[in-house]
Amino acid sequence: MKELGWDDGGKVNVDVRAAGGDYKLLESDTSELVSAGADVIVAMGSPVVAALNRHTGTVPVVFVQVADPVGQHLIDSLAHPGGNLTGLTNFEFSIGGKWLELLRQFVPKIPSVTLMANPANPNTAPFVQAITAAGGTMGVTVRTEAVTGAPDIERAIAATGQSPGGSLIIFPDGLLLVHRELIVSMAWRFSAAGRPRPWMVAGFLQS
């Protein structure tokens, strides 16, 4: 944008918001951006787009990293989004079954898998459904740990680490991204204790 002459504070004002997995803050941030008269909003992730969809039907929104925007009733179709929302989708909920298949490539006889997920994320229920269905065909017991903060994350990983043969799938979510260091350190702790586990990170836990 700078090369095109669109300097922040000059021709354009860029307002960056990051809720850090706090869904109450997400609601207030999206409301403020709409009320401030934003000309266009770039949104990352289904929770952000869903919040914006509740606050405006006119401000143009360009989204990325949204799973199945048609199924979530955010747009009419991929070819013709309609309304004020458009953008890119990078995966569908059926990929959840592929995550489980990938775990079984590392450890073919996994007896059970725990899904670590934020219940406030609209992607959670469809992903749980897809993975549970895949687990039924593979003979893998699937259970879900709802996490809303660090104590829940610690409890979920500890319970999975102590379960014989248990494995873990971490859903893509802003809350889990914020606590990525805790997740990685606890996973390492169980591996260092001589109990290596297959951990599937389905989100973006980069530092």
Image: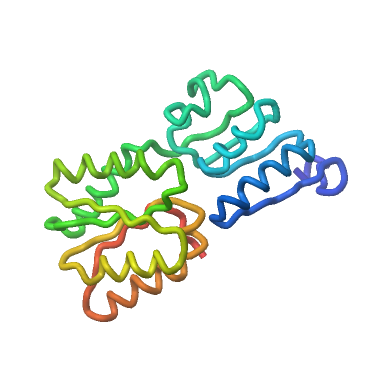
Image position of 80 with respect to 64: above or below: above
Q: Is residue 11 left or right of 200 when viewed as pictured? A: right
As drawn, is 127 to the left or to the right of 109?
right
**Quarter-of-image position of residue 127:** top left
The quarter of the displayed image where residue 97 is located:
top left
Please name the residue shown 52% across and 62% down the image: 178
Q: Position of residue 82 (x, y in %)?
A: 58, 19
- Residue 17 placement (x, y as % from top left): 67, 51
Which residue shows up at 42% across the image and 42% down it? 123
Position of the N terminus, as image quadrant, is top right
Nearest the eye: 24 or 164? 24
Residue ID at (62%, 45%): 27
Give the number of callouts: 0
Q: Nearer the viewer, residue 93 or 19?
A: 19
User: In the rendered image, which quarter is residue 38 located in?
Assistant: top right
Is 117 situated left or right of 40 in this image?
Answer: left
Is 113 left, or right, of 127 in this rendering? left
Check the image and tell me how it is coloured. rainbow
Where is residue 100 drawn, in percent x and y? 25, 49
In this view, the residue farthest toward the bottom is 193
Position of residue 88 measured from the top left corner of the image (x, y, whole percent): 52, 34
Residue at image coords 24%, 44%: 132
Check the image and name the residue furthest to the right.
Answer: 10
